[in-house]
Image (spheres, rainbow, N blue to C red):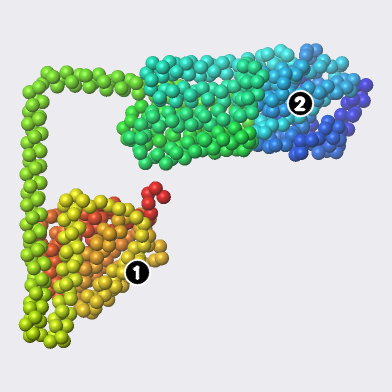
Amino acid sequence: MRFFTVILLLSLSLSSNATEYVIKLDQQDYTNIGKKLVYLEDATGKLNFKDVKDLYRAGKFKSSKESILNFGNSKSAFWIKIVYQNNTGSGSFLVVDVPNLEFVDCYIIGSNGNLQVINSGSLCKETKGVIANNNYIFSLPETAGAEDLNEVYLRVKTNNFMLVPIKLATHEAYIAGSSFKEHIESIYIGVLITLFLFNIFLYISLHEKMYLFYGLYLLAGFVYLVLYLRGYGYLFGYDFRTTIYKYPHFFLALSSMSGILFSWKFLNLQVLIPRIKPVYYIMMGFGFALMTVSLLGYKSVAASMIQYTALFISVGLAIAGIMSLRKGHRPAKFYIIAWLFRVTGVILVNLNLFGVLELRDYTFQIFPIATTIEMLLLAFALGDRYSILINNEREARESLMQLVQTQNQRLEYVVEERTIKLSETIVELESSNRVKDKLFSIIAHDLRTPFNSLISIFSLKDMGMLNFEELKMLLNANRKNIDQMRLTLDNLLFWAKDQMKQVSVQFTEFDLKKLSEVLMLVYEPIALSKNITLELNANDESTVYADENQVRLVLRNLIDNAVKFSPEDNKISINLVRQAKGLRVAVHNVVLNPIAAKNAIESGEDDKRQMHTIGTANESGTGLGLQLCREYMKANGSQLQQRIVGNEVELYFILTGSSPAA
């Protein structure tokens, strides 16, 4: 009988394309046997044992090249064939050393040819012939002869990532090999339970939500890591275990969201980095999406989401910790180290899942151990934070005692402080006086003269001393004075509102090219009177994010100054160029006296320097326009700058292209 069995197995092996090994238990330690196995993918999940045997004879099985079989996130069923020889005289176990396979069916062919089927899995009820704890242990029947070859088929299926570590060993080898794993797991399970109980006690004592979020983070993480990934949910009964294995990723989502809430409180992000709030909402949205998908029963989809969601949230919170530390939040240093362990664990697990790194037994311990270290370091961070608070309180108490003991020094400081405030008040009064003088100077010089000229023209007209043609000629001659007076009045209005602190910046998106084209139409008649050409150089994308009214006033002043100081028969260029930092807006023209132009430009930087400027056609100016330009550019997050090369002058500024929230 033994001879015919050997001949049959050898003939079947020769007809198969896969390489099949005979596992000899006297030479086999408690290690994974994946490289000695062959397997078949059942995409429909409906093949029976007879169909599988026929497909094996037809050479449809494949050889495994990995110690631990990695079938990925697949809904297919997989059939695995094992051939072994037990010549030790001892009983043997077949161990599927992972707890979260939904269906693990074992087909054992006895020495008499009878078939024994044992059904098990995370969603199956307790079955005789298998120990389903945090792995699946099938007791194999004793063989009739030491040289007999025995066949076992495994059918595995799950709606999740399917990693199948399989071990075949005698009773003695199993007991010796499994103890180390149990010792490692008992350590981090004890650490997690201790941390959870301690932080719940702190929350009850201190009533600080941060400890509640951390405790919830620990509890949900414990359920996912220990009860689901490591399979210890069986300790709480079949119903509890089934619930966990139906919705495992709900607990990971809950843990992630609790970790985000804890980080928000611990790092004080609301105060230190308020602009990170949109990222905070995005991370919470990812966690909520993962929780929803898991509760709806799409476990395979949730498993795929975890690979990217866990990495995004881990990296995002690590970066938030770095930013908080740079803002001076000292407890963040332990927090950063903790999340670096988390990020490392997530990356290593993903590399193993994608097949970049070879799966080993320790692969299943990477994420639990990395998470346990992370949670320990977060506990250190909480302790460091508490220590800093205590030190700050002690320093404040000592400082208060010192203030009480040195009251005279405090009084001197108060006197000095009030003296400084009085000096500031004097400076403000002097500034107010300069504002008044400047206002009267502008009204007396730049507005009174054009008004007097107009009044004289209309007085001559009322006396009948001018005919229509003469009146038309005089009004056209005063056109530039009227335009200048209008710009001066606009500048005065904006400047006066600014002085009264009533001007606010209203950011909107608008097309600066269209705005420039409108302004060119306004200034074209004035430019033509000096035979000056206005030129606009812009591409199609000229959208900016700024206060449109303030930018219009700035551009009007720059074009007006360019027309005023450009000699006849020249060209003024308005250049809109898109750069990495934003849109560069420049007004370029030629002047007769570069030194005078530089002095006029610099006079706008200081309201103490009042400088009346005269254009090439005797146009007058107050210097108020450039001062407004600088103030409004600063309010819009930019800066008015100048570039003078030879007799060419260019005033320019840069505006961002869109809202920061976009």
Using the image as rendered, state which of residue 267 and residue 322 is in the foreground. 267
Q: Nearer the viewer, residue 110 or 172?
A: 110
Query: Which of the two discs, 1 and 2, labels the residue nearer the N terminus?
Result: 2
From the top left corner, tell me how far across and down residue 576 is, in percent.
Answer: 34, 64
Q: Residues within 10 Å of mark 2 (few under 14, many from 20)?
A: some
Residue shown at 22% from the left, 22% from the top: 396
Q: Which mark is residue 105?
A: 2
Q: Residue under circle 1? A: 537
Where, by quadrant of the figure, is residue 122 drawn? top right
Is residue 610 shown above or below 424?
A: below
Would residue 567 be visible to someone looking at this image?
yes
Any mark on residue 654, and which?
A: none
Q: Which residue is nearer to you in this view: 438 or 47?
A: 438
Q: How many marks?
A: 2
Seen at 10% across and 54% down, the residue is: 435
Element type where label 2 sits in the image: strand
- Residue 416 position by quadrant: top left
Question: Between 616 and 352, which is closer to the camera in this rendering?
Answer: 616
Q: Secondary structure at mark 1?
A: strand
Q: Amino acid at mark 1?
A: Asn
10 Å crowding of disc 1: few (<14), some (14-19), many (20+): few
Query: Residue 533, image x and y in percent?
Result: 27, 76
Which residue is drawn at the image coordinates 63% and 25% (left, top)?
243
Residue 165, visible in the rendered structure: no
Residue in the picture at 8% in, 80% down:
462
Query: Quarter-wise, where is residue 440 in the image?
Result: bottom left
**Three-letter amino acid code of the residue under disc 2:** Asp
